[in-house]
Amino acid sequence: MLEVEIVRLKAMYVATFYGFGESPEQVAWDKLLAWAKPRALLDDPEAHPIYGHNNPPPSDGNTKYGYELLMKVDPGTEPEGDTRIELFYGGLYAVTRCTLANIHRTWMDLYKWAEGKGYTHTCTPGLEKTLISIEDMTDPSAFMMELYLSIAERQEQAGARK
């Protein structure tokens, strides 16, 4: 059974890293590592969590798509090269864990769970948060992540807060 938690992400500044092609995740990760390692930002994953999302998502008949990584940074962090610093506004998310090996199935299950619980998906992209060290990323069955499905508050919850 899918274990899901409702989480409200706070606004945060993020450094963004973009890849496009048949393996855009690797392109984005290479850019992130080249920028973050010299700054020692990978040493504290709690202070500098890493999220990713398709941008644009894969489409039928096209083997190329985009992937963007977001790494939380301190306010005032300066951009460099093609690394941008942006404000991520946060929001409400349904969150579950999975491995890279079963990510597609878990995304589908998370959408079904949210629908069954009366949540609606927002137009904000879902996020994939990395939960392992960079050195452990080679084994898809050990690559743990959290999936964040952007949701709107259910009507009865929103009405109760007025």
Image (tube, helix red, strand yellow):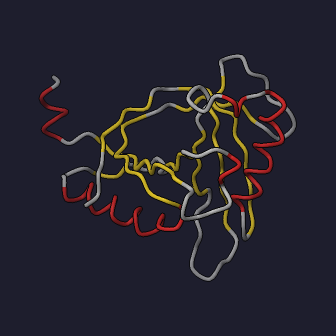
Asked whether, in this view, residue 158 is left or right of residue 137, the answer is left
Residue furthest to the right in view is 81
Q: Is residue 8 above or below residue 144?
A: above
Instruction: Give the image quarter of residue 138.
Output: bottom right
* Residue 9 in picture, x, y percent from top left: 43, 32
- Residue at 64% in and 44% down: 133
Instruction: Give the image quarter of residue 72.
Output: top right
Asked whether, in this view, residue 84 is left or right of residue 109, the answer is right
Q: Is residue 21 above or below residue 146?
A: below
- Residue at 75% in and 35% down: 84
- For the C terminus, the image quarter is top left
* Residue 96 in picture, x, y percent from top left: 37, 50
Residue 71 or 124: which is nearer the viewer?
A: 71
Q: Is residue 34 above or below residue 43?
A: below
Residue furthest to the bottom in view is 61
Q: How many labels sit on residues?
A: 0
- Residue at 54% in and 64% down: 141
- For the N terminus, the image quarter is bottom left
Q: Is residue 59 above or below residue 33?
A: below
* Residue 116 in picture, x, y percent from top left: 19, 59
- Residue at 57% in and 79% down: 60
Residue 36 or 161: which is nearer the viewer?
A: 36
* Residue 73 in picture, x, y percent from top left: 66, 26
Residue 119 or 146: which is nearer the viewer?
A: 146
